[in-house]
Image (cartoon, helix red, strand yellow):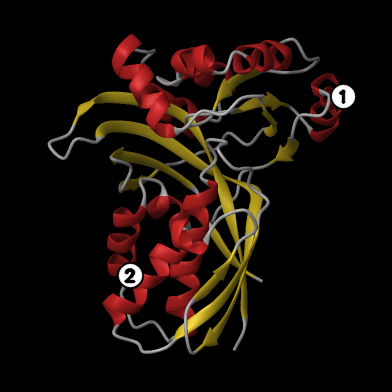
């Protein structure tokens, strides 16, 4: 049996950092939304595990690490042949590498007739990366702890997003180090959730913030430039950086307005996106 799955990217609609946990990780309080930008995985049974993703050595791939944990936890002999087609940019703040781990865990469990419970899959996901649990679920969630504590939320705000990747490369480690050194903005997450439940974009922009944005803009100054360009685009209702960047998100009332803004960004990566209700979609 061969399976093909799309794994949705995520955007952070808000991101607070509350402190440092006992395990040394940052204590986050973030609202994530899955969006219509995908990595695609093709998975088939095989005697051994192989994961092919252009540009990433197999042993360094989070999907490979997740699959090894899946087979260890399930006790299933054998493996899988996995091919990954990237659609989510690397180092974008949209969960690209975590998405592949999330999608492969779900696909393997389905392919091998559900040997692990959904909770067991989430436990493996949390061992791989902070965003993996959310990316397995998708929709709109409040994510706390290191990101593994998930609470579904109501999001009636359904604009069109224009994602633009700023020039420059910021790792999550660099972004959090900048926050530890310089601090960053904070927001009222409960007020953000109230705005989303009401579908009120104006209230959302009045309350939201990304604690990593200021520090990341220092490391990659084009982030601030892209945000300024987005906010000055005709019809743009507001803009924010997702995750640790370097993708910035502009919010528009419709696809026409979003697409008309694209030429201002030259050769940078751009994508017009919508909310999705799920994280992993079987094709």
Q: Position of residue 102 (x, y in %)?
A: 46, 60
Query: Label 1 neighbourhood size at 10 Å, few (<14), some (14-19), many (20+)?
Result: few
Q: Picture quarter containing residue 86?
A: bottom right
Write down the residue under mark 2.
69
Quarter of the image with the N terminus is: bottom right
Q: Residue at x 79, y 22 (%)?
A: 265
266 and 191: which is toward the camera: 266
Q: Is residue 20 above or below residue 138?
A: above
Query: Label 2 neighbourhood size at 10 Å, few (<14), some (14-19), many (20+)?
Result: some
Q: Secondary structure at mark 1?
A: helix
Q: Is residue 102 visible?
A: no
Q: Secondary structure at mark 2?
A: helix
Q: Is residue 240 above or below residue 78?
A: above
Q: Position of residue 149 (x, y in %)?
A: 28, 46
Q: Residue at x 58, y 33 (%)?
A: 157
Label annotation for residue 85? none
Q: Quick check: marks 2 and 1 in contact, CB under 8 Å? A: no
Q: Residue at x 29, y 77 (%)?
A: 72
Left or right position of 111 against 153:
right
Label annotation for residue 263? 1
Nearer to us: label 2 or label 1: 2
């Amino acid at each position: 049996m061969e399976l093909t799955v799309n794994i949705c990217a995520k955007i952070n609609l808000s991101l607070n950092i509350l402190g440092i946990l006992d395990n040394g990780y940052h204590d986050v309080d973030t609202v994530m939304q899955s969006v219509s930008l995908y990595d695609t995985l093709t998975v088939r049974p095989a005697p051994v595990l192989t994961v092919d993703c252009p540009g990433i050595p197999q042993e360094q791939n989070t999907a490979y690490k997740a699959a090894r944990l899946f087979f260890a936890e399930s006790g299933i002999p054998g493996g899988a042949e996995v091919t990954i087609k990237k659609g989510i940019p690397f180092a974008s703040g949209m969960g690209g590498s975590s998405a592949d781990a999330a999608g492969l865990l779900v696909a393997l469990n389905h392919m091998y007739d559900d040997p692990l419970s959904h909770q067991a899959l989430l436990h493996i996901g949390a061992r791989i990366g902070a965003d993996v649990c959310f990316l397995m679920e998708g929709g709109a969630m409040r994510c706390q702890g290191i990101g593994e504590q998930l609470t579904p939320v109501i999001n009636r705000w359904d604009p069109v997003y224009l994602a633009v990747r700023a020039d420059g490369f910021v790792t999550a480690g660099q972004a959090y180090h900048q926050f530890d050194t310089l601090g960053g903005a904070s927001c009222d997450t409960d007020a953000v959730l109230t705005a989303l439940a009401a579908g009120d974009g104006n209230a959302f922009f009045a309350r939201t913030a990304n604690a990593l944005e200021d520090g990341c803009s220092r490391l990659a100054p084009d982030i601030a430039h892209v945000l300024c360009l987005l906010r000055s685009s005709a019809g743009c209702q507001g803009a924010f950086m997702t995750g640790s960047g370097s993708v910035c998100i502009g919010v528009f009332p419709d696809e026409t307005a979003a697409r008309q803004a694209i030429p201002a960004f030259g050769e940078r990566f751009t994508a017009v996106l919508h909310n999705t209700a799920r994280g992993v979609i079987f094709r």
